[in-house]
Amino acid sequence: MKSGKVLYGFQEHPISFPPTYKFDTTDSKRGWRKKKASQVDVRVDEPVNVYDTSKKSRIPSWTDRILWREKLGANKNRRVTCEEYGCELGAQGSDHKPVYALFDVSMSQ
């Protein structure tokens, strides 16, 4: 993106949250954290926010992103501002954590 060769014209708010992938997953029906076969399952009552403990030991990353762009040739009086950009670490059941953004879209005449 920075070089301008990929996703030309798109913007992303600066990231200020931890990597959103690759977390150990939780079976939401049982509330058990999945662990290596050699370990005993542990009951958890709160979200599991442990990065990959599998044999693959994947490196945490920011794979879930929100990009935006204004329509080329758009009205110069329209302004799009990202007010908030974050993730929900409390979500369970996936090795990804959801990412959200709050935008302010202003238009003047």
Image (spheres, rainbow, N blue to C red):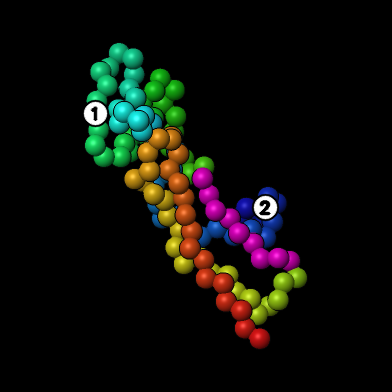
What is the total number of numbered labels drawn onto the structure image? 2
**Viewer-proximal residue among 14 and 86:** 86
Magenta region includes residue 9: no
Q: Residues within 10 Å of mark 1 (few under 14, many from 20)?
A: few
Distance Cα–Cα, label 2 vs label 1: 43 Å
Q: Amino acid at mark 1?
A: Arg
Q: Quick check: 30 above or below 9?
A: above
Q: Is residue 47 above or below residue 107?
A: above
| Residue positioned 33% across, 22% down in the render | 35
Q: Nearer the viewer, mark 2 or mark 1?
A: 1
Q: Residue 40: horizontal and vertical position, in percent?
A: 25, 18
Residue 47 located left or right of residue 80: left
Residue located at (30% from left, 40% from top)? 47
The residue type indicated by label 2 comes to: Leu
Q: Nearer the viewer, residue 78 or 59?
A: 78
Disc ID at residue 94: none
- x 38%, y 43%: residue: 91
Whether residue 24 is visible to the viewer of this picture, yes or no, is no
Mark found first going from the N terminus, 2 or 1: 2
Of helix, strand and loop, which one carries label 1? Answer: strand
Q: Are marks 2 and 1 in contact (CB under 8 Å)?
A: no
Question: Left or right: where does residue 29 sit relative to residue 13?
Answer: left
Q: Label 1: which residue?
A: 43
Q: Residue at x 30, y 31 (%)?
A: 31
Q: Most extreme residue toward the right, as rendered?
A: 73
Q: Foreground residue, 10 or 5? A: 10
Residue 42 visible? The answer is: yes
Task: Give the number of the disc on residue 7.
Answer: 2
Q: Nearer the viewer, residue 50 or 58?
A: 50
Residue 19, quarter of picture: top left
Magenta part of the chain: 64-72
* Relative image position of residue 45 (x, y in whole percent): 24, 37
